[in-house]
Amino acid sequence: MKTVSKQTFLVNSENGSILVSILVMSAVMLVFGLSLMTSLNDSFNLNTLALTKVSQMKVEGIIKSALQNGTSCNKNFTDVVLDQNGRLNLTTIKGQADEHLLEADQELGTRDLKVTTIAIETAPSDWATYNANKASATSPLALEAKIRIRYKKLKTSLGSNQSFTDIPLHFLIDKNQKIVSCDTSDSTGQTLCLQLGGAFDTENKKCYFKSNCANLNETMLPSGACVMNQITQLQTSIDSAIEQQQQTETTEAKMPEVPKLAPSTYPEPAQWKSWEKMVKSCVQMPQAAKFTGSTLSCDLGSFNITASPTEVKMSMAAMKYQGGPDDAAFIMDQVRQFILSYLASTQ
């Protein structure tokens, strides 16, 4: 007969505890590893994004610098014809020595950025203004445009894989949508000179008028008076004053007085004095005014004026003014005198 012992045996749980600890530690290391991998991946993407941005900014700087030079700009765009939407795809942009600065499908930097398209583009409002005025134009029209360079990001996965750079340019364009030249002057002097029928010398930044009074018309120079003759006399006086100043350092040459146009035959609007200084400041600001002779638009800060043969509108903050044909004619006469004074001051 067998006897079963009643002694109690304690089970050692040390081996089970070690196994649980190993499993927990493995899970912690796995989570840590995944977090580290994600962090490193994000860091790599951020670094690649920064390099991509540097490549884009470098291209923008090179192209801007090249196109600010009139010779280089004209070499790229003179005689180029825009399509019916004021747009044109380009294959390359060249420097002054005909070197290729940028090409479509070119990879940049450390192959982290690719140029997809290079195009001349215009804002719909600017293109609409050009189309409205080209039929009656007797000289090239000013057109604000931009070179849009589109890129594809090849490496980074952060954000969109597409980006672009806009480089603003000013063109003079004929009625057939062909670019005559780049307007790289520092002011509206070149544009105004050509619109008034003159010839602009890009080297000395002077406007020369070669037509005589018999050849003028209302479209070429929007005034019934022979303003061209007055401007020619003004140019002669300025050249004479400069010559006298160069001949002697002790004698200060007097600048000629700006010729005055004939007084307007239209009555002065009752509120004109309140708006006169703002109109003058606006039309003499290089990038603010667009003057075609028969129409005017100008924006300077909160001030805005638009004028045509039939009406004139002005506004500034809460102040507003609207006038009819006579008011518009009077104000356009004043604008011509402001522009004449401006041209004289830039010589």
Image: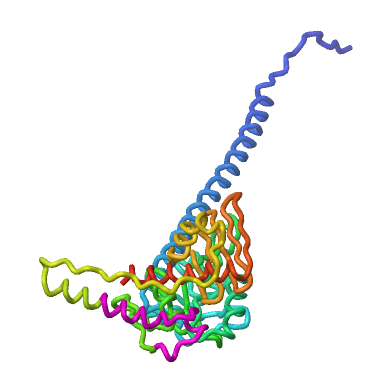
Position of residue 200 in the picture relative to residue 48 (left or right): left
Residue 68 picture quarter: bottom left
The residue at 26%/77% (across/down) is 237
The vertical placement of 314 against 116, above or below, is above
Position of residue 171 in the picture relative to residue 204 (left or right): right
Task: Inspect the magenta stretch and tell me whether residue 206 lies in it.
Answer: no
The percent position of residue 31, horizontal first and vertical second, equals 62, 39
Q: How many numbered marks have been drawn onto this rendered protein structure? A: 0
Which span is picked out in magenta?
A: 213-238
Residue 110 picture quarter: bottom left
The vertical placement of 223 against 277, above or below, is below
Residue 95 picture quarter: bottom left
Of the pair 124 and 282, the residue shown nearer to us: 282
The percent position of residue 11, horizontal first and vertical second, equals 72, 18
In the rendered image, the residue lying farthest to the bottom is: 214
Q: Quadrant of the N terminus?
A: top right
In the rendered image, the residue lying farthest to the right is: 1
Q: Quadrant of the C terminus?
A: bottom left
Task: Inspect the magenta stretch and tell me whether residue 227 lies in it.
Answer: yes
In the rendered image, the residue lying farthest to the top is: 6
Of the pair 262 and 256, the residue shown nearer to us: 262
The residue at 37%/79% (across/down) is 72
The percent position of residue 309, horizontal first and vertical second, equals 60, 74
